Amino acid sequence: MRQKPNAAGLIAALDTPDAARAEGWAAAVAPHVGLVKVGLELFCAAGPGVVGRIARHRPVFLDLKFHDIPNTVAGAVRSVCADRAAAPAMLTLHGGGGAAMIEAARRAAEDTLGAARPAILAVTVLTSFTAAALAETGVAGGPAQQVLRLARLALAAGADGLVCSPQEVSRLRDAFGGAPLLVVPGIRPAGSAAGDQARIATPEETAAMGADWLVVGRPITGADDPAAAAAAIAASLPR
C-alpha cells in the first residue's frame, strides 16, 4: 500500500449510473489523473465488476463509505478485496463508525491482500454539511471540531488517512503532520458552480494547504471535453 503522491494529485469522480459512460470518462481522463473514483451511484447500478473494468484505465478510489457493525464492515472489505486484480487502491468508511469498526476493516484488508491492501480512509464530515446541518444531527461545535475529533479516533484505530473538506486540511496538517493521507472533495475551479457542496475551495488553494489528493467530479465530467478539463486542473496544481 502506497498512495501518497509526491505532490497533490487529481482524482476524477465518475459519478454516473452508466457503466459505459464511466469507462469512457476513465479512458479519457487517464493521462491527467492519478486515480478515478467509483462511488455508490455507479457501484450500485453496475455491480462490483465495474471496479475491475474501470481499474484497467487507472487505479480506483472506491468511495462506498462503509458504516456498520465491525463484523459486517470486515466482511464487506473482504468482498471488495477478494479479486486481487480488481482491488481498489483506496477505500472509504465513515469515521463515525468507531474505532472497533476501523480496526476490523484494516485487519480484513491486510488478511485478504497483505501489503497490497487498499489504503483505509475515514470520512470525517461530508462536504455538504454546514454547521447548522451538523447541529441537526446532534453534533455541536461545528464541522472543524467534529473533523478533528473523528480524525484522532480514526488514525489511532489504524486508518491510513482521512476524507475532509478543503476547510479542514490546514488544521489536520497542524494536528497530525504530513503522515496521514488527506483526500479532499469539495474542489471547485474558479467560476464553477458549487452545486450541493457547502465547504469548498479551488484546486490551487487546496493543494497549497497540504492535501494529497483532490477529488473533482462535475467540473470534469460535466465539461464538454472531460479530458481537457482534467488536464487543465492537473496543470494548475503545484509540482
Image (cartoon, grey):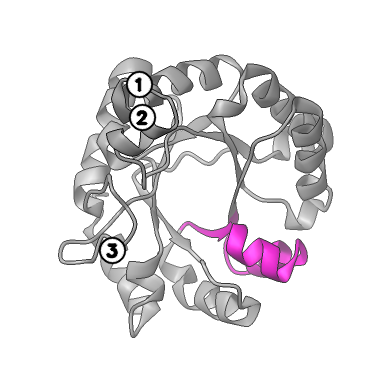
Question: The disc labelled 2 sits on which kind of residue?
Answer: Ala
State if disc 3 and disc 2 touch (CB < 8 Å): no
Q: CA distance from mark 2 to mark 1?
A: 5 Å
Q: Is residue 96 left or right of residue 106?
A: left
- Residue at 46 percent across and 32 percent down: it is 124
Circle 3 Cα neighbour tier, 10 Å, few/some/many (<14 / 14–19 / ≥20):
many
Above or below 95: residue 221: below
**Mark 2 or mark 3: which is in front?**
2
- At mark 3, the secondary structure is helix
Where residue 168 appears, as percent x and y from the top left, is 30, 32
Question: The disc labelled 3 sits on which kind of residue?
Answer: Ile
The residue indicated by pointer 1 is 140
- Looking at the rendering, the stretch of residues picked out in magenta corresponds to 34-60
Where residue 30 appears, as percent x and y from the top left, is 49, 69
Indicate the quadrant where residue 5 lies: top left
| First along the sequence among labels 2 and 1 | 2
Where residue 27 appears, as percent x and y from the top left, is 54, 76
Q: Is residue 68 left or right of residue 232?
A: right
Where residue 207 appears, as percent x and y from the top left, is 27, 44
Q: Which mark is residue 156?
A: none
- Residue at 38 percent across and 77 percent down: it is 226
State if disc 1 and disc 2 touch (CB < 8 Å): yes
- At mark 2, the secondary structure is helix
The residue indicated by pointer 2 is 135
**Mark 1 or mark 3: which is in front?**
1
Question: The disc labelled 1 sits on which kind of residue?
Answer: Ala
Asked if residue 53 lies in the magenta stretch, the reply is yes
| First along the sequence among labels 1 and 3 | 1
Q: CA distance from mark 1 to mark 3?
A: 35 Å
The residue indicated by pointer 3 is 233
